[in-house]
Amino acid sequence: MGKAYRDLGDNNKAIELLSESFRISKKINDKLGVCYASFNLGIAYKNLGKRQKATESFEKALEISKEIGNDKLKNNIKLAMQSVQ
């Protein structure tokens, strides 16, 4: 749902829902879920002009993508990080 709100341009609602997704994924040790939530949070923060929070979220997602060996996701995160700089 958070990504859907982000895609619709309601980044504040997206952040609210993605933060909840992040907390739940972390609680159940779902690394892929944490990674996607962090990645999408980064995009929502970037859309709001919150570059520092976007960078922190992308860095978290990148670290996890490396841990789980998801190269496609890792490359997407790196591309998104470049758009913040």
Image (tube, rainbow, N blue to C red):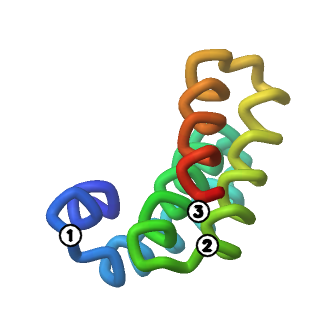
Residue 48: where, in percent of width, then height?
41, 78
Give the Cα separation between the discs numbered 2 and 1.
Answer: 17 Å
List x then y, in percent, for residue 63. Answer: 82, 41
Dot in front, 2 or 1: 2
Q: Is residue 41 above or below residue 61?
A: below
Where 52 falls versus 72 (above or below)? below
Residue occupying the point 46% across, 58% down: 43
71 lies left or right of 67: left
Q: Is residue 24 left or right of residue 63?
A: left
SS at circle 3? helix
Q: Residues within 10 Å of mark 3 (few under 14, many from 20)?
A: some
Residue 45, label in figure = none
| Spatial CA span between label 2 and label 3 | 19 Å
The first of marks 3 and 1 along the sequence is 1
The three-letter code of the residue at mark 3 reads Phe
Judge whether 20 appears above or below 26 on screen. Answer: below
Which mark identifies residue 9?
1
Which badge, 2 or 3, comes first in the chain's sequence?
A: 3
Residue 50: name its quadrant: bottom right
Q: Amino acid at mark 1?
A: Gly
Residue 53 placement (x, y as % from top left): 66, 74
* Quarter of the rendering occupied by the C terminus: bottom right
Marks 2 and 3 close (CB-CB < 8 Å):
no
Q: Is residue 15 left or right of residue 74?
A: left
- The residue located at (63%, 50%) in the rendering is 34
- Count of numbered labels shown in the rendering: 3
Residue at the disc numbered 3 = 22
Q: Disc 2 marks which residue?
A: 51
